[in-house]
Image: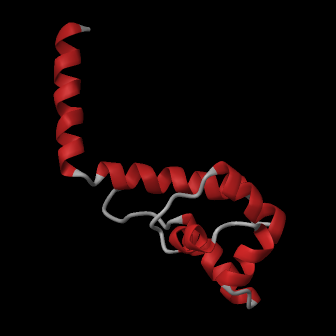
Amino acid sequence: MNTNRIPTHPGDVIKEELEYRGITQKRFADLTGVPYTMLNEILNGKRPVTSDFALIVEAAIGISPQLLINMQARYNMAVAMNQSSFMTRLEHIRKSCAAIF
């Protein structure tokens, strides 16, 4: 995986679709029963898209929940792989386990 560029957070796709349709975040939150603060955090990439939320979005505006979950997984993986301390930990685990197995 190329980690030079972090993939698009699925919240960006949802945000663009709401803007295109002229639906405010407040209105979408009211229509779907999702707390406004939670919705805003998702749309701004500060909170992940969960399976439940992806299904809500699909019911409301027809975006594939599988697409959103796959985007979230790619985003999460890229973020993790860009954390140098975590990558150092993984390298240590690889070396330790290679000596045992």
The residue nearer to you, when weighing 35 against 44, is 35
State which quadrant residue 43 falls in: bottom right
Residue 89: percent from left, percent from top: 20, 35
- Residue 76 x %, y %: 44, 52
Residue reaching furthest top?
100
Q: Is residue 90 visible?
A: yes
Residue 99 position within the rendered picture, expressed as x and y whole percent measured from the top left: 16, 12
Quadrant where the C terminus lies? top left
Position of residue 82 in the picture relative to residue 1 (left or right): left
Q: Residue at x 64, y 68 (%)?
A: 35
Tell me which residue sits at (61%, 52%) in the image: 50
Counting the numbered discs, the total is 0
Q: Is residue 101 left or right of residue 51?
A: left
- Left or right of 36 in this view: 81: left
Q: Residue at the location (17% across, 19% down)? A: 96
Tell me: 96 left or right of 20.
left
Q: Residue furthest bottom?
A: 22
Residue drawn at (46%, 57%), measured in percent from left and top? 75
Does residue 1 show up?
A: no
